[in-house]
Image: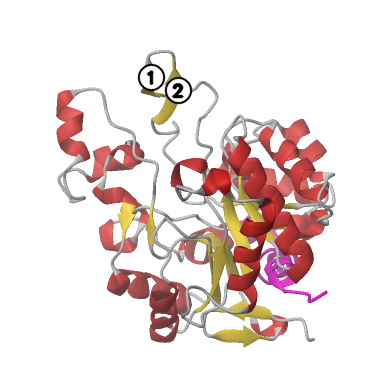
Amino acid sequence: MTAVVQTVTGPVAPEELGVTMAHEHLLVHNPSFVEPLEASDRLRARQPVSQDNIEWVRQYWTSNLDNLEVYDEVTAREEAACYYRAGGDTLIDATTRYIARDPRALVRISRGSGVRIVAGTGFYVAETHPPDMARRTEEDLAAEMIGELTVGIDYTGVRAGFIGEMGCFWPLREDERKALRAAALASVETGAAVMVHPGRHPDAPAEIVSVLTEVGMPADKIIMAHMDRTILDAGAVLRFAETGCYLEYDMFGLETSMYPTVAERTEAGIVPSRPPGLSVISDAQRLERLDLLIEHGYADRLLVSMDICTKHRLHRYGGHGIDHILENIVPWMRRRGTTEDVLQTLLVENPRRVFTVNPR
């Protein structure tokens, strides 16, 4: 069997993948909604995203329901077309089952925009798991993922091309641990990469790598997403890079300084909070972190993207769009002295390597 990258419109040779953003969501139900505490904010939480509330939504993007429902296929196609015109070739769509994944729509978006799309399989955080998750075994879950990778998703004939994003909380819940182990089993069977959404704690990525590798999965098929909000200490990042997995800096364009409200479990129930230390770094700081890792020899383990999973970051709503890295960040990197060889490694070679399915 030949190594390929599996897109929603069929397999392609790895060398055809081209410039690739490694973590996006063209259509998605973002399950991050947190109910605001104040009455006036609760009113804004239920208003459509518009010019009248966009500044509030940009700061509190997890607390507006409409912002978290990215369902418009026409808008998705237009956003993907902007990326294509900027020089983009492929998008990795990290939307999984139960958060509005739509494989047939991804096919239409791909054909309408000219962009190749690679779809994911797997399970996001426990809140989005199916009702029977506790009764299902690792082998059951692995079989479902293997089927979507090798046969197709829900009788559509559209095959997933990687596993993820697998969602994790901190501390890791048992069903999430089980799903991770199942993802590792499916990866070992198929050769597909596993992308993980880690919990918001600097120790979470290392624990996840341990869970995956103890099942026999090679570290060089693990993609640790959201590194730009998870491990902020430079020394800790370098120590984690020694694991050999891919480090994904995928929040380019999100520059709100503070992380928006999240749900915290307390004795009084689930309440909104802003845990200390969850600040959002800037694009400049993201580039400094990439520079650090490149200087220490990890250029071949870095992936970049924007993880657009809300309306407010789309061009349609005044945001930066999926073309942000190509239109704004890459020229900035060139001005800062990044070589063309490094850009080729980050944008083309690394995605091609990790998203190539190597049959075993």
Residue of label 1: 269
The kind of residue tagged 1 is Gly
Image position of 57 with respect to 29: above or below: above
Quarter that holds the N terminus:
bottom right
Q: Secondary structure at mark 2?
A: strand
Residue 348 part of the magenta-drawn span: yes
* Residue contact between numbered discs 2 and 1, judged by CB atoms under 8 Å: yes
Q: Quadrant of residue 55?
A: top left
26 to the left or right of 120: left
Visible in this render: residue 337?
no
Q: Main secondary structure of the magenta part?
A: helix
- Along the line of sight, the residue nearer the viewer: 349 or 209: 209
Image position of 40 with respect to 88: above or below: above
Q: Residue at x 39, y 46 (%)?
A: 31
Q: Position of residue 173 (x, y in %)?
A: 59, 35
Residue of label 2: 265
| Count of picture labels | 2
Q: Position of residue 231 (x, y in %)?
A: 66, 35
